[in-house]
Image (tube, rainbow, N blue to C red):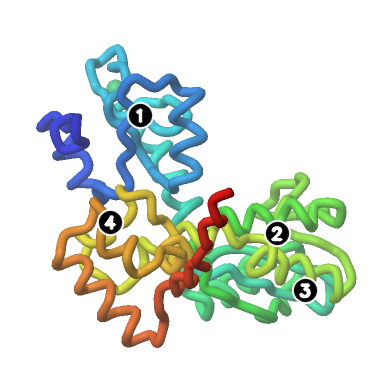
Amino acid sequence: MSIKALLSPEVKAFLKRHDIPLAAVFNATDMKRAGYGPAMKAGGHLVAVGVSTCQNGHALRTRHGKCVICSPATLSFSRRYEAPGEVYLAYSEMGSLYKVGITNNIANRVEQLNAQGTGGYYDWVLLAIRLCAAAGEVENHAHTLLSPYAVREPHAGRQGSSREIFRCSDDVALDAYRRATVDDHPKASKRARVASLPLTERTREMLIDGGVRTLSDLLDLTEAEFQFHRYLSGNAKREIAAYLKMEGRSFRKVLPVTEVQPSAPK
Ligand SMILES: [Zn+2]
């Protein structure tokens, strides 16, 4: 059954209200959570349909099997985790401290760090900032790399261990930041690549439904394969071809087939 056929009016309304595109909905018909969970993660899907109903009769679950309609908070968590955002690296010279975090307004954020006296210091400056496809995942990854250097943070009158403030050398901080945002996270940035291409939503959905999730997946198709891609309508093909041309990209060229001479009959 197609995804559209699996959407009850209530689920449809929920998706619309939370601005969840069809491309982010996974068809988990006949699958158990152990199966659809990892598949959703790999595909960057937010919610699954075709799942068993919760005690209130909803059939829309997260990759962890939670009913999204009963607990929409789980959704905003994973959205923040996978949503694009700016991951910054800030530094306090007086404290010799680094902080990695996410923001959508960096000027404001640095001001806030100083107004709050984050880590007990008021001289925070911005060292680096980068727009990431899955900002929460990148942030989390940087925090994990820096976790051996995490410091206790006196923050808002509450004493506790912080996962977000680190005392280490410049090299360690910059290296972790760089690895998390660039080298170490091809998956995060790739995942969002097709979803963020400047194509119509319908075309992006078709690509993702057809198993094309990254730009390199797409470029790995030969032109002939692409023309016959059964998921794509003619409009989508024209749109993609125009986009690739504009970007100066092209499909993999077909290797010439070496002709094999039949061996002479004995
Ligand atoms: Zn429910």
Q: Amino acid at mark 3?
A: Leu
Residue 32 visible in this rendered orientation of the protein: yes
Q: Amino acid at mark 4?
A: His
Residue located at (75% from left, 70% from top): 121
* Residue at mark 2 to residue at mark 3: CA–CA distance: 10 Å
**Does the residue tagged 2 have its C-beta within 8 Å of any atom of ligand 1?**
no
Query: In front: 132, or 258?
Result: 258
Q: Secondary structure at mark 2?
A: helix
Residue 77 in the image, given as x and y percentages of width and height: 46, 44
Residue located at (13% from left, 29% from top): 8
Q: Circle 1 is placed at which residue position?
A: 61
Q: Circle 4 is placed at which residue position?
A: 229
Using the image, determine if residue 26 lies above or below residue 249.
above
76 left or right, relative to 111:
left
* Residue at mark 4 to residue at mark 1: CA–CA distance: 30 Å
Q: Which mark, residue 142?
A: 2
The residue at the far left in this view is 9
Q: Residues within 10 Å of mark 1 (few under 14, many from 20)?
A: many
Q: Amino acid at mark 2?
A: Ala
Residue located at (47% from left, 57% from top): 191
Q: Residues within 10 Å of mark 4 (few under 14, many from 20)?
A: some
